Image (spheres, coloured by chain):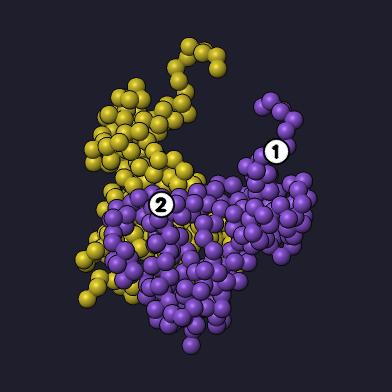
Chain colours: A yellow, B purple
Amino acid sequence: MPRTGRRPGPSTTRATLLEAARRRFAEGGYDGTSLRAIAADAGVDPAVAVHFFGSKEALFRAAVGWPFDPAVVAERLAGVGADELGPAMTRLFLDFWDDPATGASLSAMLRSAMTHEASAALLRAFVGQQLFGRLGHLVGGPGAALRIEMAAGQMIGVAVLRYILRVEPIASASTEELVDWLGPALSRYLRAPS
Amino acid sequence: MPRTGRRPGPSTTRATLLEAARRRFAEGGYDGTSLRAIAADAGVDPAVAVHFFGSKEALFRAAVGWPFDPAVVAERLAGVGADELGPAMTRLFLDFWDDPATGASLSAMLRSAMTHEASAALLRAFVGQQLFGRLGHLVGGPGAALRIEMAAGQMIGVAVLRYILRVEPIASASTEELVDWLGPALSRYLRAPS
């Protein structure tokens, strides 16, 4: 690549910030990483990182490749009754996979995490901070983290078969059919054991 | 690579047979593929293929990278009552992932199928022929194939989180804890709806 001597363009700066963020978050987790440190690694002012990504949380999501804001999902699920939480989550999850843009991002993120340890470390940090941090209070009760992961496992496995491996008949099953089966399964995990 | 002019050794013949089998099974499925055609592609007598792999079914498993014989699993589950089928399957599945040899094969197979379309096609053919063919009669009832895939999805997703991404707390949860949660979930899928 020829060096032009010009200042790096916006796309280079963005990519450099993402690369620094991936390394920092994978090593130090979310709480142990500052926007300032990432910006310093990328050789820019912290204000530049804020300009590109808006917040440390949004930069974290961009670094992981997570295509939506878990806070928005948590908000949409906040008013949902305990028995409807499973079906509502199933619907939201399938919507994200059915949408070509978010579906492609979810698929790429999962593939990357399953084949590169650095991406896996990043996703682990994200799950710990965002999934439990944002959705944990919707679930609650003893063993909530394990129950959330069991529910997440159910959804991830169905996504692998339906959207990535495209195994029949689950690849062609209707959303309603899946919600009927998966909804109660998820509700069982998410309901606090009495 | 220098050509020595000697006949190909056993490891070369085995690899050539596996390569031919992967191509043939992915294109034609299990029923549409003969051991004879695979052997011809590999330039050997069908008896050589039998010598190396034992049967077309075993060659199929080796081509997919599937580390155990579904027929043996079906046999072990044959005497299990309907309500115990979920816990028994969960236990068997976790055993295969906990065993370093079979666990590594399962992980490699899943990674490969998720990142290479040819491997995905091969796994689709395998699931259709072996998973439904061998385990379908244990389940039965309307929508059995979809219910088997929902159960498989639950197990695959948990394996992704526990064994591949190693997300906590599910990575360190005990087998019993997982059986307690997953067993009833699987039984619900596998029981014929009344």
The circle drawn on residue B184 is none
- Spatial CA distance of label 2 from label 1 is 31 Å
Residue A115 falls left or right of residue A69: right
Of A186 and A97, the residue lying toward us: A186
State which chain disc 2 sits on.
Answer: B
- Which residue: 40% across, 31% down? A19
Asked if residue A163 is positioned above or below residue B189 in the image, the reply reads above
Residue B139 percent coordinates (x, y)? 52, 78
User: Nearer the observer, disc 2 or disc 1?
Assistant: 1
Q: Which residue lies furthest to the bottom in this view?
A: B194
- Which residue: 63% across, 66% down? B129
Q: Is mark 2 on a helix, strand or loop?
A: helix
Does residue A161 appear in this view?
A: yes
Residue B69 falls left or right of residue B121: left
Of A74 and A175, the residue lying toward us: A175
Query: Which sits earlier in the primary sequence, circle 2 or circle 1?
Result: 1
Residue B147 falls left or right of residue A139: right
The amino acid marked with disc number 2 is Pro
Residue B77 percent coordinates (x, y)? 47, 75
Q: Quadrant of residue B132?
A: bottom right
Of A192 and A92, the residue lying toward us: A192
The circle drawn on residue B100 is 2
The circle drawn on residue B8 is 1
Residue A166 percent coordinates (x, y)? 59, 59
Q: Is mark 1 on a helix, strand or loop?
A: loop
- Which residue: 73% across, 37% down? B7
Q: How crowded is mark 1: few (under 14 residues within 10 Å), some or many (20 or more)?
A: few
The amino acid marked with disc number 1 is Pro
